[in-house]
Amino acid sequence: MYLDIRGLAARYHELQVLDGIDLSISRGEIVSLIGPSGSGKSTLLRAVTGLLPPERGTVSIGGEEIDYKDRRSLRAARSRLAIVFQQYNLFGNMTVLQNAVVAPVKIRGRSRAEVEAEARDLLARVGLGDKLDAYPDQLSGGQQQRVAIVRALCLKPEILLLDEVTSALDPERVSEVLDTIRLLAAEHITMLIVSHEMSFVRDVSHRVAFMAEGRVLEIGPPEQIFDAPQVQRTRDFIDKISRK
Amino acid sequence: MHYVLQYGQVTPFLSYFLGGALISLVLSGLAFCGGMFFGLVGALCRLHGGPVLSGLVRAYVVFFTNTPQLVQIYVIFYGLPDLGILFSPFAAVLLGMTLNAAAYLTEILRAGVTSVHRQELEAGETMGMNHLQLLRFIILPHIFRVLLPPLSSQYIMMVLGSSMAAVFGVEELTGRAFNVNSTTFRSIEVFTLVAGLYVLVTLGATILLALVARYGFRARVKVL
Ligand SMILES: Nc1ncnc2c1ncn2[C@@H]1O[C@H](COP(=O)(O)OP(=O)(O)OP(=O)(O)O)[C@@H](O)[C@H]1O
Ligand SMILES: [Mg+2]
């Protein structure tokens, strides 16, 4: 397994949010995480990236276990991951192009010319070729999220984590961002996606994990989770959202 | 009363005054830089320093923002020598202004640091930035952008406040005005000219700060 999460637990002070998460993703696989609000989906992504250091359990990438207490190990893991949040991802003081190249160039020491060429190419592909010098607050929410995704890709991550990247957007902006993710799906990038867009999840995922009460209660192909859930809790959740 | 303005008597001192203006600018500029550095350290201590450090910084801020700057410099210049610590007038004023600015800037910068979006910092962190890189690429550009107006006015107050250096014998702009006044006795001419020069100096200081913000810290600000 490529990204291997075992028995992961994490808490915010008194609140035990993750309580033994088991989840494995193979290379090139796209797994979506669904579940009620507050079930800990964002927390799981934050724990994996070390923003909220786990209290128990292990995470390994390509067989290498991450030691969250060791800076070198954490930095090495972070160089293989990239995460996009719901909103305010972009650095407000940098243009679109600067946002995309700052980390590869200044942190990872790659050549500016090379990274800029890649960034221009990616930005053009998501329809933002004419916005290179715009600042984030001059873009629509959907455009900002596409830039955030491009910026994540410029890091050449082995695994991309997406946390409800469309939920802060106007409905008419959602599809442009989802199309961008579909583009990536076609290139077999390993992704862990948290999303409320159920038809998108069904369409793009190889497997879907249902999360509640700090655990993954059921995981399987989209047809199983959406059409024939095996666990009562999953069934209730699917019923509830499909009634809406 | 019949007073004939005779600027001709003071204009020969123009370059002497300009030299004084430069000293004012350098004095306040150095104090501002020092104040920014210690103010940033103070702001970060207040936000992330734990109860003890944060409490100490708070006490420092309360003390320095609630006592007159002139008195603070008196303590440094006339009080510390009793303990065997001697300063030149310039150094004493510079130190006093720096410590004072650090206190005010701690509060200003604290507000600036808290207004950075947490997600921006987290994005930077997951992209591999360490604390210094977060400061350089995210926090400082943000601070210089949103806080340029209060920072400019703090800087201007410091340029003007540097005139108290004359009290300690530093020959900056006001000190030189005293000198020229005592030989020419053209008070109105001397002090109106000097006032005009202060306007130019503060304008220059504001532009300088905007330039530093823009080109030194990549902040999105207009220079003029
Ligand atoms: N910074 C925080 N401090 C304290 N508690 C938090 C924090 N962030 C989240 N929580 C709590 O942790 C629990 C899980 O939150 P999380 O954001 O992971 O849920 P989620 O599944 O992503 O929900 P949503 O679908 O609404 O985004 C919630 O009860 C939430 O209130
Ligand atoms: Mg969430």
Image (cartoon, coloured by chain):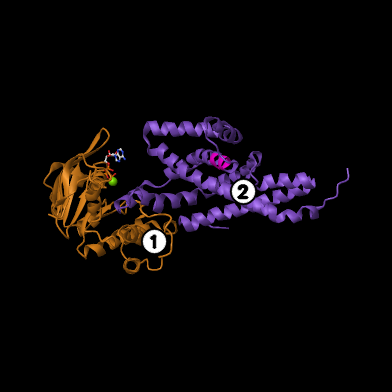
Chain colours: A orange, B purple
Residue A18 among magenta residues = no
Q: Which residue is mark 1?
A: A98
Left or right: residue A116 versus residue A67 is right
Question: Which quarter holds ligand 1?
Answer: top left
How many C-alpha atoms fall within 10 Å of the one at disc 1: few (<14), some, or many (≥20)? Answer: some
**Which mark is on residue B182?**
none
User: In this rendering, which labeled residue sits more in front, label 1 or label 2?
Assistant: 2
Q: CA distance from mark 1 to mark 2?
A: 38 Å
Left or right: residue A155 versus residue A236 is right
Q: Main secondary structure of the magenta part?
A: helix
Left or right: residue A51 versus residue B184 is left
Asked if B35 appears above or below A130 in the picture, the reply is: above
Chain designation of label 1 = A
Chain designation of label 2 = B
Q: Residue at x 35, y 48 (%)?
A: B131
For mark 1, give the secondary structure: helix
**Which mark is on residue B24?**
2
Determine which quarter of the picture holds residue A13. top left
User: What residue type is disc 1 on?
Assistant: Gln
Residue B92 among magenta residues = yes
Q: Residue at x 46, y 48 (%)?
A: B143
Residue B87 spot, x, y in % from top left = 56, 39
**Which residue is most to the front?**
B84
Range of residues picked out in magenta: B91-95
Residue A37 spot, x, y in % from top left = 27, 43
User: What residue type is disc 2 on?
Assistant: Ser
Residue A35 spot, x, y in % from top left = 22, 45
